Image (tube, rainbow, N blue to C red):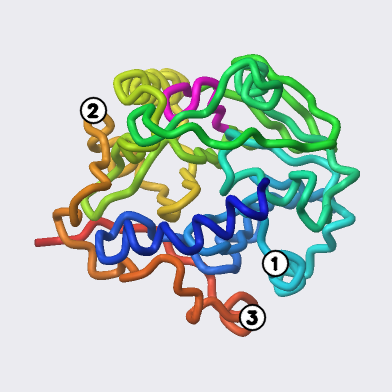
């Protein structure tokens, strides 16, 4: 079902969101010496590398060009043994579904035990204010189920798993080496800072806002200001910018204000995503739009 769902989104989503400045994905390339990403239409998947080990964060769409773009980053799909899933939506798990190219057939999947209920069919994923039920995700990969606050270690890469429900019931974010926070679909970056993610796609928007406030407080208490990396709107190391408007939700049914001149008109247009840029240009952080 993943291939069909991915193709459906490729056709329908541009019609819904074109010109509204909602999706602002990074192109394929490197944020720094540790973090790289691949662009799949409006979504990003990430790789974190240290001391010869690479872990993957989210698995994107069921995307025909994934192997090609991993080659731009000199990453062999067969080398990926651990994939952290923030949640199980089509644009975050496609590459590990049963009808995918199975590039990561031997990788273990890590996701919250609550999120796993979608995969077992105990709970169905609902969007558009619960009016539309998404098809079930099917994967044969081994799953490791996680609890809030659990610590993982991958050859010296420390990963802290933090439950941030709202977009989905079991959505997790991952704090890596206390320096990078991979947030999936919890935070949306507007031109003037971070908001709770898109209203129409959340299981519970009020819970999303509450979860983000708790996440911010946890980081503040520990004196942590990590680089925050989102699933669809880039990255920032400005803590105040990241959490500027988390008491509000991104309204996906209107053009965003303030205007973001860097936002693509059509997030599905990948013409600017090239191997040359991936190899030579570092991916810039999101900065506030003045005026």
Disc 1 and disc 3: Cα gap in Å? 16 Å
Q: Secondary structure at mark 3?
A: helix
Is 195 drawn above or below residue 168 in the view shown?
A: below
Q: Which residues are magenta?
A: 164-173
Circle 2 residues within 10 Å: few <14, some 14–19, many ≥20: some
Which circle's residue, 3 or 2, is located before the other in the chain?
2
Q: Specify whether residue 165 is painted magenta.
A: yes
Is 283 drawn above or below residue 146 in the view shown?
A: below
Is 8 drawn above or below residue 30 in the view shown?
A: above
| Foreground label between 1 and 2 | 1
The spot of residue 287 in percent (x, y) is 30, 58
Which residue is painted at 14% across and 56% down in the image? 258
Which residue is painted at 84% across and 36% down in the image? 140
The circle on residue 247 is 2
Residue farthest along the left direction in this orientation:
291
> Which of the image's four quarters has the C terminus?
bottom left
Q: Specify whether residue 255 is painted magenta.
A: no
Look at the magenta stretch and give its main secondary structure: loop
Disc 3 to disc 2: CB gap under 8 Å: no
The circle on residue 275 is 3
């Amino acid at each position: 079902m993943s291939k069909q769902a991915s193709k459906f989104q490729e056709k329908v989503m541009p019609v819904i969101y074109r010109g509204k400045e909602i999706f602002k994905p990074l192109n394929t390339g490197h944020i720094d010496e540790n973090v790289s990403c691949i662009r799949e239409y409006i979504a990003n998947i990430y790789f974190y590398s240290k001391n010869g080990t690479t872990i993957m964060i989210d698995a994107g769409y069921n995307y025909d060009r994934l192997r090609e773009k991993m080659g731009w980053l000199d990453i062999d799909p067969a080398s990926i043994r651990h994939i952290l899933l923030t949640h199980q939506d089509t644009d975050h798990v496609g590459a590990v579904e049963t009808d995918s190219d199975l590039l990561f057939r031997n990788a273990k999947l890590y996701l919250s035990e609550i999120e796993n209920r979608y995969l077992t069919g105990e709970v169905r994923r609902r969007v558009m204010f619960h009016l539309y039920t998404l098809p079930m995700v099917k994967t044969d990969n081994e799953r490791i189920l996680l609890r809030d606050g659990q610590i993982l270690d991958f050859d010296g890469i420390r990963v802290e798993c933090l439950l941030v429900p709202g977009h989905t019931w079991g959505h997790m974010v991952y704090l890596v080496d206390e320096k990078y926070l991979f947030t999936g679909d919890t935070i949306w970056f507007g031109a003037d800072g971070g908001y709770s993610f898109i209203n129409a796609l959340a299981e519970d928007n009020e819970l999303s806002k509450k979860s983000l406030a708790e996440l911010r407080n946890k980081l503040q208490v520990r004196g942590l200001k990590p680089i925050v990396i989102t699933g669809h709107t880039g990255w920032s190391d400005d803590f105040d910018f990241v959490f500027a408007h988390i008491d509000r939700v991104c309204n996906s049914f209107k053009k965003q204000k303030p205007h973001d001149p860097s936002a693509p008109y059509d997030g599905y247009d990948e013409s600017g995503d090239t191997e040359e840029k991936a190899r030579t240009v570092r991916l810039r952080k999101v900065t506030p739009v003045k005026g």
